[in-house]
Image: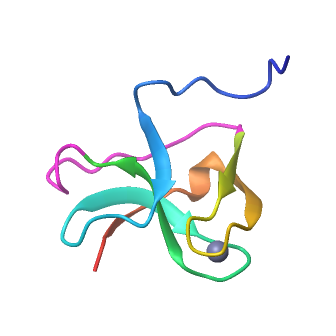
Amino acid sequence: MSIERPNFEGLVTRPAMGVTGRHYYGLNCSACGEQIAVLRDASEGAVPVKIVGVTEIEITCPYCRGVSVHAIEDLAAFTHL
Ligand SMILES: [Zn+2]
């Protein structure tokens, strides 16, 4: 059992490649550099949100399957192209 992992149930989608034209918060894979969608931006860019915290998140890249750990503050808004 881990008590250090944040519980984002209901907020986090499975890290994904994203849908073209949709807005997400995500980051770049440490291994392949692709942009990974982590959180869906329900406002579609209308309401900027700054994600803060001291925790880290472990991401499995949907492109290369590489696992990387990032500070949650590294999540940044982007539009999937
Ligand atoms: Zn990758």
Quadrant location of the N terminus? top right
* 46 drawn magenta: yes
List x then y, in percent, for residue 67. 75, 60
Is residue 15 positioned above or below 21 on the image? above
Residue closest to the eye, 47 or 33 = 33
Is residue 4 positioned above or below 32 on the image? above
Q: Is residue 34 left or right of residue 45?
A: right
Q: Quadrant of residue 69?
A: bottom right
The range drawn in magenta is 42-55
- Tell which quarter ligand 1 is in: bottom right
Is residue 64 positioned above or below 3 on the image? below
Quadrant location of the C terminus? bottom left
List x then y, in percent, for residue 29. 64, 72
Q: Is residue 4 left or right of residue 24?
A: right
Q: How many marks?
A: 0
Q: Quadrant of residue 65?
A: bottom right
Residue at horizontal 62 percent and vertical 47 percent from the top: 72
Residue at horizontal 27 percent and vertical 65 percent from the top: 19
* 74 drawn magenta: no
Residue at horizontal 61 percent and vertical 82 percent from the top: 33
List x then y, in percent, for residue 79. 28, 70
Q: Main secondary structure of the magenta part?
A: loop
Residue closest to the eye, 1 or 41 = 1
Residue at horizontal 23 percent and vertical 72 percent from the top: 20
Residue closest to the eye, 28 or 49 = 28
